Amino acid sequence: MKRVSLGAAWLETTPFIRREAALLLPVALLFLAVPLALMFYAVPPELRQMQLDPGAPRPTVPAGSVLAILLCLLAVMGGTLILYALALKPGISLREALGLAVRRLPVALGAALIAGVAVLVPVVLTSAIAPRLGAVAMLIGAAVVSIRLLLINAVVVDRPVGVIEALRTGWTMTKGQAWRLALFLVVVTLAITLAQFLGNVMLGLIGFAIGGKGMALETGNIGAAIALALGQLYLIVMIARMYRQLSA
């Protein structure tokens, strides 16, 4: 059984991004940062703040905001597939990568839907018995699916397979790699979260100096979206490198 080398994947990732920055960065900013910033903006202000009072009435989300968030998530998924195409297929043009992403988007959405249902069904069943047990089941299920299907988008972009075969292939390729991939996800998640926080604070301070608290909130969201998009770019390229190791 092949073992994925995180060190080798990282050593290949940074030079690749530097070499292809003129192509990768605009795609990441346009197809990831912009919809993420719009999605943050679409969330009502009262939902952006943690509600400390459990008895407080829950704010409602307007239908328009829900639609905007769904469209932004769709754009992010499309941008993710474009970046996978650019990372996996040497010499592919942006137009070709865009076309490939559009063709493979239904498969990626189908795989995400099935994976989500696979997590939610046991959560709903356990929540009916004990709410706290349901929360634990959600954490465990999400962690297992995230690790075992880490390569799913790379599979969808690289192979002309359907939803079920993509799920089966992605699950099989990570067999025996769970602990290494779990460590990788923990480290990357912490790094991206820190970058997102710093981006929020830095652009938030600039916005506050320009237009006060209201401007700080919006510019902070933009900074967080840019940092998250760049973090996702590194994550995608590194996963693509790991996929190539395991599929060679």
Image (cartoon, rainbow, N blue to C red):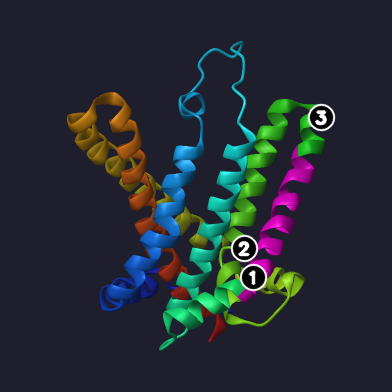
Q: Which mark is residue 128?
A: 3
In this figure, which residue is indicated by the disc labeled 2?
A: 149
Quadrant in which the N terminus is drawn: bottom right
Q: CA distance from mark 1 to mark 2?
A: 5 Å
| Residue 114 part of the magenta segment | yes
Identify the amino acid type marked 2.
Leu
Determine the image quadrant of residue 237.
bottom left
Residue 214, x across and y down, in percent? 32, 27
The one nearer the camera, 181 or 12, is 12
* Residue 245 visible: no
CB-based contact (under 8 Å), mark 1 and mark 2: yes
- Left or right of 87, for residue 156: right
- In the image, what residue occupies the spot 50% across and 65% down? 80
Residue 199, x across and y down, in percent? 29, 44
Would you place residue 5 above or below residue 224 in this image? below
Question: SS at mark 2?
Answer: loop
- Left or right of 134, for residue 142: left
